Amino acid sequence: QSVLTQPPSVSGAPGQRVTISCTGSNSNIGAGYDVHWYQQLPGTAPKLLIYGNNNRPSGVPDRFAGSRSGTSASLAITGLQAEDEADYYCQSYDSNLSLYYVFGPGTKVTVL
Amino acid sequence: QVQLVESGGGVVQPGRSLRLSCATSGFTFSSFDIHWVRQAPGKGLEWVAVISSDGTNKFYADSVTGRFTFSRDNSRNTLYLQMNSLRPEDTAVYYCAKGPGLVGVAYFDHWGQGTLVTVSS
C-alpha cells in the first residue's frame, strides 16, 4: 500500500480540464516536503513533469500545473490532448524511518 | 544531452544474483546523486536505492536492504547494482535516475530506458 494516495483513473474529453490529487500525511507532504510529478507514456520510462510542487522543466507545456496545500497536492491538466493519455505519479520524501522517497500508486488519464 | 543507459537485466532463478549497470553521459557524473527505481509488471513505481555523488552514502528501501548493493565508478561514469538472493517479487523493470544535484531536494530529473529483471524458476 502506497504512502501517498491517488485516484486510480481520471478521464476527460479533448480540451477539458482534469485534476489528479495526491494525498499524503504529516511525515511527507504535510511535513513540508516538496511534491513532484512524473508522466509515463505507454511502454516508456517516466518523465519529470513538475518539480518542487509547481515548477515545469524546460519543454513541459504550461497546460500542466501543480500545487500543494497541507497534506495534499494536485496536478491539473488544462486543454486536455490525446497525447496526454498516460500514467501520472506523484512523489515526495518521507521522514519516517527508512521510507525515504515515496511514490503515489499512479493515476491513469484517459482522453475520451 | 543527459543519458542514462541500463544493462544487465535478464531471467534469473530465485536465490541467485545479478548485477545491473547504468552508463551515463552528458553531465558531470561526480556531482550528482543517482537512484534506482523499479516497476513491477503492470504496477507502480518503487524507489530502491540512492548513492551520493561521491559514493560514500548509500540508502536502500527496506525491501532490498541486505541483499542489494549500490556502487559507482566515477572514473567510468557508471553505476552498478549488485542484486543477491533474488526473489520473485524483485521481478521488475529497473530504472536508474539522476537527482537534481541540489542539497535537500529529492526528485529524479532524468531517467534511463530501464532493464527488465525476471526472477523465476
Image (tube, coloured by chain):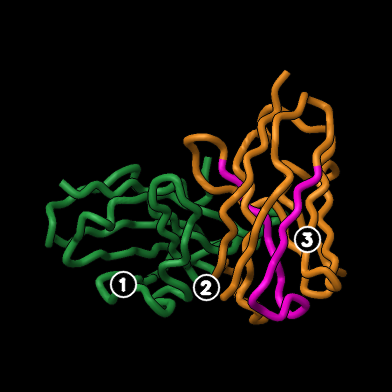
Q: Is residue B103 left or right of residue A22?
A: right
From the image, tell me which residue sits under label 2: A32
The range drawn in magenta is B19-39
**Whether residue B16 is situated above or below residue A54 in the rendered picture:** above
- As rendered, which of B59 and A3 lies closer to the eye? B59
**Residue sitting at x 73%, y 18%:** B121
Magenta stretch, main secondary structure class = strand
The Cα atoms of the two marked residues, 1 and 3, are separated by 33 Å
From the image, tell me which residue sits under label 3: B79
**Residue sitting at x 68%, y 61%:** B35
Does the magenta portion include B26? yes
Residue depth check, mark 2 versus mark 3: number of the one nearer the observer: 3
**Residue sitting at x 60%, y 50%:** B114
**Residue sitting at x 20%, y 59%:** A81
Q: Is residue B48 left or right of residue B53?
A: left
Q: Position of residue B4 (x, y in %)?
A: 64, 63
Chain of the residue on which disc 3 is drawn: B
Q: Is residue B19 left or right of residue B113?
A: right
Q: Is residue B119 left or right of residue B57?
A: left
**Whether residue A59 is situated above or below residue A14 in the rendered picture:** below
The Cα atoms of the two marked residues, 1 and 2, are separated by 19 Å
Q: Amino acid at mark 3?
A: Leu
Does the magenta portion include A74? no
Q: Position of residue A47 (x, y in %)?
A: 46, 62
Assign the N terminus of chain B to one quadrant of the image: bottom right
Q: Which mark is residue A85?
A: none
Local secondary structure at mark 2? loop
From the image, tell me which residue sits under label 1: A65
Q: In the image, which lettered chain appears green? A: A
- As rendered, which of B43 and A70 lies closer to the eye? B43
- Within 10 Å of disc 2 (Cα), the crowding (few <14, some 14-19, many 20+) is some
Local secondary structure at mark 1? strand
